[in-house]
Image (cartoon, rainbow, N blue to C red):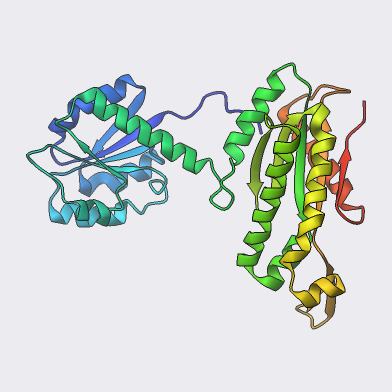
Amino acid sequence: MGEPENPPRRRILVIATEPAALRPLLGEMELRDYDIHVSEPEQVMELVEQRGRFTLVLVSAGLTLDGLHHLERVLSHPDLRSAPIVACATVEEGLDLAVVDQLGGDDVVDLSTPVRVAADRLELLVRRSVRLLETSPLTGLPGNTVIRRRLAERARGSSRFAVIHADIDHFKSYNDHYGFLRGDALIGFCVRCLRQAQQATDVDSFLGHIGGDDFVVLIAADHAAAFCSSVIDLWDAGVATFYDQADRERGAIVATDRRGNRQRYPIVTLSLGVANNVRRPFKSPEEAVALAAEMKEYAKSRPGSNFRVDRRS
């Protein structure tokens, strides 16, 4: 989970038949370390196929209706789906917002404004887009890109810290039985438990969502055990409310598997694995993650909600 040594260049795709009005703005964006790629609508698909992902897409307001219709297909390309789409126009040209909506546009820039103001607006749009891409849409927590960055920062420092891998046990059986909407609600409950424990033990800790029912916490080593205990107490106190009454009373889900056999799935529990650099330094961020995952699997082998700490020297 280390940081790439050379982050990819930021690239702007400009779709315009007459890009002259855009040149001052594009020059300013080049000074801000963006690569600029200009194309007419008819050739843009070929350019996207050649160059791959773009950071931002600028569309000139001077396109014909045929050009706009052609762009609807182009802008749905996988390499453009995460890039903000900005329509650019002068006051004289004007711009119909219905056209922007038709293109799936995110903003409009008036080319009559000072170049630096327009460029600042584009920068802010890119930053918002990056934050959204780095955030789990389900939980609102930072995702793997931010987790990697934060872990690398901690690993480079000299402080004693712990990596905690949290995972819901038997989540798949719950999700299969009750459906994904209730599964999402259970994940939301897990986030609330993690956040409450974070507030009670170490507000400066970092909480990220790896994906699914897996989470990571970066926390001061001295606070890790108290955090885990708090999470488990909160989880065990509230998780039964996510079950139907009959399942709560029997303490399990009873369902028929694909082979027609009756299976019993216990109430979901929480397992947390803890690795820290107190007894030995981490050789790499990857080692820290692997050790936490190993301890999480050890916790899973025990009945009920548990946490286990790597105490090897």
Q: Quadrant of residue 194?
A: top right
Q: Is residue 64 above or below residue 128?
A: below
Q: How many marks?
A: 0
Q: Quadrant of residue 285?
A: top right
Question: For the view shown, which residue lies furthest in the left direction?
Answer: 92
Judge from the rendering whether residue 11 lies leftward or rightward of residue 16; answer left or right. Answer: right
The answer to whether residue 50 of the structure is visible from this angle is: yes
Kindly identify the residue that appears in the image at 12 percent across and 51 percent down: 64
Question: For the view shown, which residue lies furthest in the top direction?
Answer: 158
Question: In this orientation, which residue lies closer to the viewer: 289 or 199?
Answer: 199
**Residue 44: horizontal and vertical position, in percent?**
27, 45
**Residue 127: horizontal and vertical position, in percent?**
42, 33
Kindly identify the residue that appears in the image at 69 percent across and 32 percent down: 205
Judge from the rendering whether residue 97 lies leftward or rightward of residue 273; answer left or right. Answer: left
**Residue 201: horizontal and vertical position, in percent?**
76, 34
Kindly identify the residue that appears in the image at 84 percent across and 43 percent down: 229
The answer to whether residue 254 of the structure is visible from this angle is: no
Judge from the rendering whether residue 182 lies leftward or rightward of residue 292; answer left or right. Answer: left
Judge from the rendering whether residue 273 lies leftward or rightward of residue 184; answer left or right. Answer: right
**Residue 168: horizontal and vertical position, in percent?**
76, 54
Question: In this orientation, which residue lies closer to the viewer: 50 or 233?
Answer: 233
Kindly identify the residue that appears in the image at 80 percent across and 74 percent down: 247
Q: Quadrant of residue 112?
A: top left
Quarter the N terminus occupies: top right
Quarter the C terminus occupies: top right
Question: In this orientation, which residue lies closer to the viewer: 81 or 44?
Answer: 81
